[in-house]
Every structure is written in structure tokens, then in C-alpha cells.
Image (cartoon, rainbow, N blue to C red):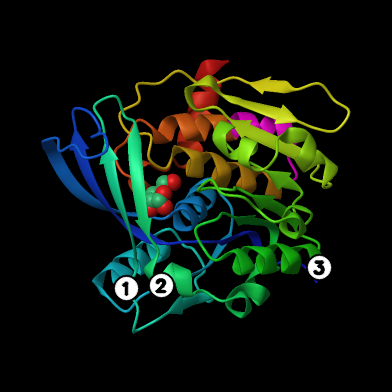
Amino acid sequence: MQPSFDVCVVGSANLDLVATAERLPGPGETVMGSAYAEFAGGKGLNQAVAASRAGARTAFAGAVGGDDAARQLIAVMDADSIDRSALVELSDAPTGRALIGVSSSGENSIIVVPGANGRLKPNDVRAAAGSGRVLLVQREVPAAVVREALGAAKRAGALTILNPAPASRVDEDTLALCDIVIPNEHEVQLLGGVSTLLDFGVSSVVITLGSRGAMLCRPGQSVLAIPAFSVEAIDTTGAGDAFCGAFAATMSRGVDIVEALRFASAAGALATTVRGAVPSLPHREAIEALLTNAE
Ligand code: RIB
């Protein structure tokens, strides 16, 4: 059966409560902030919006609560033409929240309170997970949901991509279901390193390095560096999600992985130039313009 979507994203949806300060506080410290704002976010929703804005027909499977925050996030899904038939709305749960501090250099620190995201069940995502050419999943929903999504997508013949964020260990059965894993430097260590991932049958490991670009590691091939794009970064929140969503969208078009990574790298760079997660995720035209100007 033909997949109904280019990309299905299974993951979290949060309302981001964002405070900006000259620098981030250390443990036990209070610093004075300069601004406060609320934005749509959550790694899952961010990646779904990024994929849709990059041109992919996108479905999102996740959970929200029965509050005002849920209505705001649903409005974002609709505005970005994201199919939400597999969105679970739990009237007795709060929507996920992320408390985010952003410094004047654009760095952030994030505490996620999962709320409804933590109540998502494997059964909720089974059908949707196999409905795209590409499945993209992160780690802000229960581990059993992540495993089920990857398994269902594999059975349906989809390309499976895991972004193992936030950093934590991932069980071997789950890793064995991944075609591509996109960790950052810290996450790849927690997963046992690149060779361990390749030994589990992962065909490509993409290590994201922030402003230093990314590295593509494949079995039996030398490591390939994907250069970063130079931009004026003001807020790095959501940049990794822009990268993953744009990458999944491009891979769904059957584009070569190196070209897809260049596109993703441009999307990630653009996302750092705008405040907030969802508001910063670039559209395909802007990504292509950056790629053209860099040539
Ligand atoms: O990756 C950025 C995201 O992490 C934020 O939008 C926040 O909600 C957390 O999930």
C-alpha cells in the first residue's frame, strides 16, 4: 500500500515558557531576566512543523491535554497543515510544558514536564507510525511508544529515524529498529558510541555538532563532515529539531543522504536566527535561498 504521508512524526508537543537573561543561572543561583514569552514547542511537534515547512506531507502522532495550551498547539498543527488524526486529547491531563532559559549568546537550558506526553500509549501510535515513507521519533514520549512506533514503521516498509533526545540510554531492541540515528555529541556517548550503533544494524549515524556542523558515519566508509552555515544566532532552541524535520522531509523525496544533510544543516542554522521553537522553523524557500547563496 502507498504511504499516505511523506513523513510521520511520533513525539511530544509542549508549550514552551521562555525566559531570556544575560546568562543562564548555575545551581542554586537566581539571575534577573530581560524578557518572557510563550511559544509552541516540544521536540515532536517542532520536527513535524519543520518537516511540513520543508515541503513534506506530514502527520503527527502525540498527546495533548484538555487545556488552553492544547488549543494553541492544535492551532499550530492546523496552520502548518499537519494531519492530526492520531493526536490523543486527554481531558484530564495537562499539556506538556517546557521551562526554557535562553542566554544573550543564544544558549539554552530546558526542563520538560511531560504531562499528557507521558501518557501516550503504544497502541495510540501504531497505525500512524506506518503511514509515512519516513518515520521520525524522539525520546520525549515513553520508551514503549518509541519502540512501537519504530517497529510499526519497519513492518510497513518506512525509513526509520531516531533522534535520541533528550539524552538517555536506549534499549538494544529499539536501536535495532533504526535505519538512521541522529544524536548530538553527548547522546552518542550514552548510546555506546558510533560503532555500537552500526553493530546494531543502523545504516547511518549523523552526529550533530551545533555551530560546527554534523558528521555522517556509515559502515565501512570514512566519516564525512557536513559543514555548518554561518549565521547570527540569537536562540538555539529548536535548531536540532529543524535539522531532523528538514532531513526527514528531504529523505522522503528519495534525495541522496549527503544532499539531505546539507539541506538539514541550512534549516538548523536558520532556526537559530529567530526566537522560540516553532516560530523559528524555516520554510523550504528560505532553506533553498541559504543553500544557493552559500554556493
Ligand atoms: O528541542 C527543543 C524543544 O525541547 C523545546 O521546544 C521544548 O519543548 C523541548 O521539548
Instruction: Confirm whether the magenta stretch covers residue 259.
Output: yes
Q: Which residue is mark 2?
A: 116
Classify residue 244 by image quadrant: top right
Give the percent coordinates (x, y) of residue 11. Answer: 52, 61
Residue at (33, 36) in percent of width and height: 108
Q: Going by the image, does 55 lie left or right of 126?
A: left
Which disc number belongs to residue 102?
A: none
Query: What distance separates the C-alpha of mark 2 from that of mark 3?
Result: 27 Å
Question: In the displayed structure, does residue 211 sit left or right of residue 275?
Answer: right
**Residue at the location (55% across, 55% down)?**
139
- Element type at marker 1? loop
Q: Which residue is mark 1?
A: 94
* 264 left or right of 130 in image: left
The residue segment tinted magenta is 254-263
Residue that numbered label 3 is attached to: 155
* Cα distance in 3D space between marks 3 and 1: 33 Å
Does label 3 or label 1 sit earlier along the sequence? 1
Q: Are marks 2 and 1 in contact (CB under 8 Å)?
A: yes
Q: Residue furthest right?
A: 220
Kind of residue sitting beneath label 1? Pro
Q: Which quadrant: the N terminus?
A: bottom right
* Kind of residue indicated by mark 2: Ala
Compare residues 287 and 13 and report the one nearer the observer: 13
